[in-house]
Image (cartoon, grey):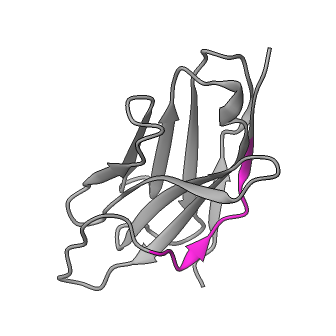
Amino acid sequence: QLQLVESGGGLVEPGGSLRLSCSASGVRLDSYDIGWFRQAPGKERDRIGCITTREDSTYYEDSVKGRVTISRDNAKGTVYLQMKRLKPEDTGLYYCAAYFVPPGVITLGCHDMDYWGKGTLVTVSS
């Protein structure tokens, strides 16, 4: 069972930046597409974007394009979500999730995820 852990959340002022990390204890994430999601207070969880495992292709929802970047460092077994120009409406619980990609398979776009972390809280407020 893959156990994902998010970190890097906290309080940030509007207009600020924040980088979240996603890792798995004792497991490399090389074979997984990784997605980032956000759940704002009182709302459903929405996808932010994802990064594929084979070609490091990234896909972003229109609502966040230009403000977020997803990247991965396979040597460190970590996937990052870099956010900039944060707004109060970016406040929420941020999750990373993983989709296992069998050897030889190249994925396109974001898939439904198999494994989820417990989230890290981001609060954008002055």
- The number of numbered discs placed on residues in the rendered structure image is 0
Along the viewing direction, whichever of 66 and 56 lies nearer the viewer: 66
Is 102 drawn above or below residue 17 in the view shown? below
Along the viewing direction, whichever of 59 and 81 lies nearer the viewer: 59
Q: Where's residue 79, x and y in %?
A: 46, 52
Q: Where's residue 113, x and y in %?
A: 50, 74
Looking at the rendered image, the quarter that the C terminus falls into is top right
Q: Is residue 65 magenta?
A: no
Q: Identify the magenta region.
A: 112-121
Is 88 drawn above or below residue 32 in the view shown? above
Say which quarter of the image contains residue 23.
bottom right
Along the viewing direction, whichever of 93 and 22 lies nearer the viewer: 93
Looking at the rendered image, the quarter that the N terminus falls into is bottom right
Relative horizontal placement of residue 45, taking residue 48 as reference (left or right): right
At 69% across and 32% down in the image, what residue appears? Answer: 89
Say which quarter of the image contains residue 29.
bottom left
Principal secondary structure, stretch drawn in magenta:
loop
At 54% across and 66% down in the image, what residue appears? Answer: 97
Q: Where's residue 38, x and y in %?
A: 63, 50
Relative horizontal placement of residue 117, taking residue 80 as reference (left or right): right
At 72% across and 36% down in the image, what residue appears? Answer: 91
At 60% across and 24% down in the image, what residue appears? Answer: 86
Relative horizontal placement of residue 42, taking residue 58 as reference (left or right): right
Q: Where's residue 117, x and y in %?
A: 66, 65
